[in-house]
Amino acid sequence: MVVYEENGGTLIKLDETLINPEVHQVIISTLNKPMLVNWLKAEELPEPFFEDIASFEQTPSFEDFSEGTVLILKYLKLEKEEFIDFYEENVALINLGNKLAIVCKDEMTAFDIEMKFDKRMRGKKTNLHFEMYTFLDILTDQQIQALDGANAILENLEESILSESVEKQKALKNLYYARRSLNRLSHIFVNESVALGRFFTSITTSIKKKFRFEFLDLKEHKQSLVTECKSLQDKTVSLMNLQLGLTDNKANEAMQKLAGISLIFIPLTFFTSIFSMNFKNMPELDMTHGYHVVLLVTIATGVATYLWLKKRKYL
């Protein structure tokens, strides 16, 4: 648990974690800290919000109640590159009076957010809405980074598919899981855009004017995330079709070669069937070189058929 306290217009990181009701503070913590939980309960944070923060299934949302606001967004990180699987975690931005609490589920997530926040805010003048914007921008940048990683993986997979250096079943399996992950991400980004829209609506006009460029930047980033995610979904489907098309093409080539080989033996089979008949009046049987002539014609027919098929690239 980390506590920042406003001092002379800037935030100072406290050596000792202490929640002071008299001054403006920023609290970054996980939900399992007794000091944080007791303070939230003392501030009458609704009980269902605790469950929403802890639940991975909770979608991004914004709630406005008499004591303050709660904005729940997602912290995303590319976890399994092979399947383009993402680690997702709820991060709650709780505004209660002169306090802004950033509540995570995992210690590493809280540490990562705190480090980035400290780097951005060090020595800068601060206020509640600028701090809120900074945290929103940190989470958005994290999502952009995760999506960029997914895009790079799909590009590498496309190259491996075209070079045929990847196993067919493995590629299709990876693409299937990638499409499923991207579908989930698209759902998250759309819900976050709705939640942020409700958050922006709750802000007073004066604050909107003061931070219009910052909040406009966030809106544009969220819209670009939705667009980019849908683009990656389409790319995943295209790669699946490409892989299936290459597989079908290989099967067609194999069938074409089998048909060509069959075509070579069709005239040979014809000659064999003719000269295997046991009729008495077959003049070829009495020819001195009949066997050699028929053998030569048979070989010549097979070679000619092969060369013809080779020229037309059937073999």
Image (cartoon, rainbow, N blue to C red):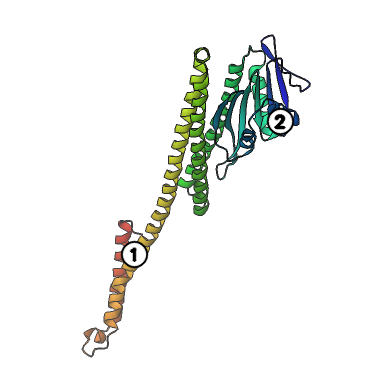
Q: Is residue 181 above or below residue 131?
A: below
Which is more N-terminal, label 1 or label 2?
Answer: 2
Q: Is disc 1 surrounded by few (<14), some (14 to 19) or many (20+) residues within 10 Å?
A: few
Determine whether 35 is above or below 281 in the image.
Answer: above
Is 27 positioned to the left or the right of 246 in the image? right
Q: Amino acid at mark 1?
A: Ala
Q: Which quarter of the rendered picture does the N terminus lie within?
A: top right
What is the quadrant of the C terminus in the image?
bottom left
Q: Nearer the viewer, residue 139 or 201?
A: 201
Q: Quadrant of residue 283?
A: bottom left
Q: Position of residue 79 (x, y in %)?
A: 61, 40
**Residue for badge 2:** 37
Q: Residue at x 46, y 38 (%)?
A: 232
Front-most of 152 and 123? 123
Tag 2 secondary structure: helix
Residue 289 visible in the snapshot: no
Q: Residue furthest bottom?
A: 280
Q: Position of residue 60 (x, y in %)?
A: 55, 33
> Mark 2 belongs to which amino acid?
Val
Query: Where in the figure is residue 195, as x and y percent of width and height?
Result: 51, 29
Residue 279 visible within the image: yes
Q: Compare residues 207 and 80 and report the one nearer the observer.
A: 207
Q: Residue at x 30, y 79 (%)?
A: 272
Per the image, the residue denoted by label 1 is 259
**Residue at coordinates 46% horizontally, 43% vertically from top-left?**
236
